Every structure is written in C-alpha cells, then in structure tokens.
Amino acid sequence: MNLSGKQVVILGAGRSGRAAAVLALREGAIVSVHDAAGLEAISGMPDGVTIHPHASVETGASTRCDLLVVSPGIDTYGPLVAAYSQHAGELIGETELAARYYQGKIVGITGTNGKTTTTELVSRILAAAGLGGDPCGNYGVPFAEIVMKAEPPSAVSLELSSFQLETIRALHPLVAVWLNFAPDHMDRYPTVERYRAAKLRIFENQSAADTAVIRAGESLPGVKARAEHFSTEDESVEWFSDGHVIRHDGEVVLDLMADTSLRGLHNAENTMAALAAGRALGIPFETMRAALHGYAPPAHRCELIRTLDGVEYLNDSKATNLHALESALRSQTRPVVLIAGGKEKGLDYAPVVPLLKKKGLAAVTFGQIAAPLGEVLSGAVPVESFSTLTDAVQAARRLAPRGSTVLLSPGTSSFDQFSGYEHRGDVFRELVHQLR
C-alpha cells in the first residue's frame, strides 16, 4: 500500500488514532486528525500532523481524502462516519492499516468473552518460542505501534473486537481463534445478527492453509481454514478439559492445577484455545507448558481481592455482558452473593435467572440499571438495589454468610459512573479492603 503524497484522515484522536497517524506519516502521507472533542484532547500530535477539533457531520461532509481511518470507539454506521465517508477513497481502521505493513504471523483472537486472557496466554507462548508475540489490538498496544518498532516481532497475539473487525479488508490471521458468542453491544448494533456478522469477519481472508480454532458447538458458516475444536463438554473433540487437566487427542498435555493459577471452566477454554494456536504454529508442548507456568489471570477477571470472616470477595469487573456474568457464576463452587449493575445496554438478563437460582444466595444491584435489573434477578434470589457501588458492597457484606463468595460481576458496562471496567474494579477493590 503506497501512501506517499496521499491525503489520510484519522477520525478519533485516542491512542489507536494517534498510532495510525504516526504510521501514515511514516509512509509519506499527508495526515490530519479529526476528533469531536476540543483542542486540548488532540494536542501533542507529532510534527506534520494537522489537527481538527470539534469534528462534526458538517466538517465531515466537506472533507476529502484518499483514505479514512476510523478509530474503533466511533460507530462505523453512525452519522459522523457516514459524513466523512462521502468523499473518502477508502474506509478502514487502525488495525487494518497496520496489517498492511506487517510481514509476520498473526494470531487473531475474537469472542464475546475471554479475549484478553487468551491474548495474554498466546503472547506468552509466542514469546517463549522466540517469536516475540507482543499482545496488541483491542488489548495491549495498538497494532500500528508494533509495526513501527525498529524490529517488529515475528508473530503477534492480536485481540480483535467486533468494532475493529468491521473495518478490515485484507487482514489475514494465520490462526483465527473464535472463543464464544453471546449478545453484546446492543447499544451499537441494531441486531444480534449484525454483531455476529462483524465478528465472523475474522475468518474472511483465511484459506485452507490456515487454522481456525473454534469452541465446539459453535455454528460458523463459510470457514475455509482447517478447524481445531476445544470443549469442556464434548470429550470427542481435539481439545478437552474437565477444568483440572487439558487433553489433546486424549493425552494430558497440561495440568491446570499444578502448572498454572488458572481456575474454572472458562479459563480452561481460554487455555485450550491458546495451546491450539501455539500448536498450529508448530510450538512444542514443552515450550508452551513452560510459558504458562505460574500464570495468573489479569486483574478484574474473577480476581480474589481478600477473604474476610470466611467470605471470599471476587472482582470480575471485566464482565460487561450477560455471557461473562454467566461464565463467572457457573465457575463458582461456593454460594454467591452477586453484585451486578451499571449502564443500560439494552440486554435481556432473564436467561441468567435459572443459573443464579442455582448458584446464588442473594443479589445486590447498583447504578443506572439497578432497579430494572433487580426486578429481573428477584425471580431467582432476594435482591437489594442501590445507586452506588459503595452502598452495594456494604449490603453484600451484610448478606454474605461465612463460606460464601461476594462476586462483583456487573453484566454490563461501567460508563454510567466510571471511566471503564478497570476504574470500577479498582474502586471495588478499595471498598473491599476498607471493610472491617
């Protein structure tokens, strides 16, 4: 792709947009960055980049460019992008732009839940094999930052959200990992089918020479790559785990309890997917076991904060949708007092009621969705609802008997009260440590 002398407009001045701007500038493009925010939000751009604050539908309609690069946080189907697209030669995202300048092997990872943990696991495996394996994309650093390294790694572990996959054209993962699928982001997508179609694009440019790592039972039309399946239910597939060990073709290849700090069936699935990706690249099991030894999941993903008066407090703030909430609940072995709530995303929480009835003692809801969510969950357990997480934690402490678990697994995003799930999880951690 030759950008020399071409007009490139970057829409969105976050880290992803800035990385795209620097890469386009390196390739000789005439680069401008547009953002709906004010001047202070897009200052500090490198020399040679023109900035346009207060971007709007009006400015978009009057802007012409050879290439429009849209940041993933901006709705691809919204009026702002539609306006900027009117006089753009091509529309892509930062991930696609970076892929056009990357010569190494891509392990692409998508799914509604588990992407980040799997991306980290794959990264460790690639690094142990001497391939570099930097985690990037939706987790880690923008792909463009990896491409601009003096010596880019031989392989990358690339987390791909539906937002990033919407704007790919030529991105070609040698290994594409499909972890799972459940409704999410219904505040952005008009239908579940539209969301699913975006995620399915991860397989679009694969051929029979590539590998698709797929959770058993997923119906994925049109996959051309050689498929490897993993499961915690079907022992007949290539990769199977009971949550304690992982088997490949019936042979134990990893002891989760002895070799890692990963627990629960959802983490077993993430680990199988990572091992399958590594094996597709020819990495020996010995190398992969060494890479995963002692690995603990990232913060905010069923993270044990403390045990107080015989009650465990778990931070699963990363659970920003129903499927993640269900996975966290299903993996618990102690009775649960659930803390859930946050932003209204238009999701239907009724499917969690039977599982909560089985696993839960009580539920505490908070935030924008506190009242309607509480009404749904009351079909399973006693519920108390509050406006703030502070009050919710105090109530959970009161409701949780010795031998139980207080589980923060919100089931929706945090943007009603927090800057992100990390902020929400950090506040929860601090509140739990303040309990006496």
Image (cartoon, grey):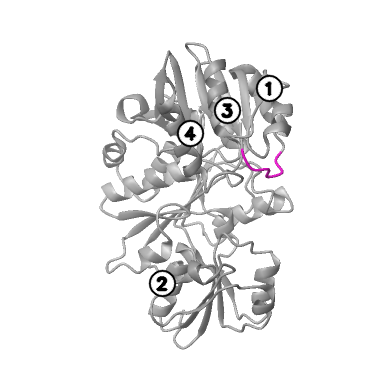
Residue 148 position (above or below residue 288):
below
Q: Are marks 1 and 4 in contact (CB under 8 Å)?
A: no
Instruction: Tell me the quarter of the picture where residue 387 sits.
Output: top right
First in residue order: circle 2 vs circle 4: 2
First in residue order: circle 4 vs circle 3: 3
SS category of the residue bearing label 1? helix
**Residue of label 2:** 44
**Residue of label 4:** 428
First in residue order: circle 2 vs circle 3: 2
Q: Residue drawn 37% across and 29% down?
A: 251
Amino acid type at mark 3: Ala
Depth check, mark 1 against mark 4: the one in front is 4
**Which of these two is toward me, 284 or 11?**
11
SS category of the residue bearing label 4? helix
**Residue of label 3:** 392
Depth check, mark 3 against mark 1: the one in front is 3
First in residue order: circle 1 vs circle 2: 2
Within 10 angstroms of label 3, few (less than 14), some, or many (20 or more) residues? many
Residue 92 falls left or right of residue 239: right
Instruction: Tell me the quarter of the picture where residue 36 sits.
Output: bottom right
**Residue of label 1:** 354
Residue 115 visible to the viewer: yes
Question: How far apart are the alpha carbons under marks 1 and 2?
Answer: 51 Å
SS category of the residue bearing label 3? helix
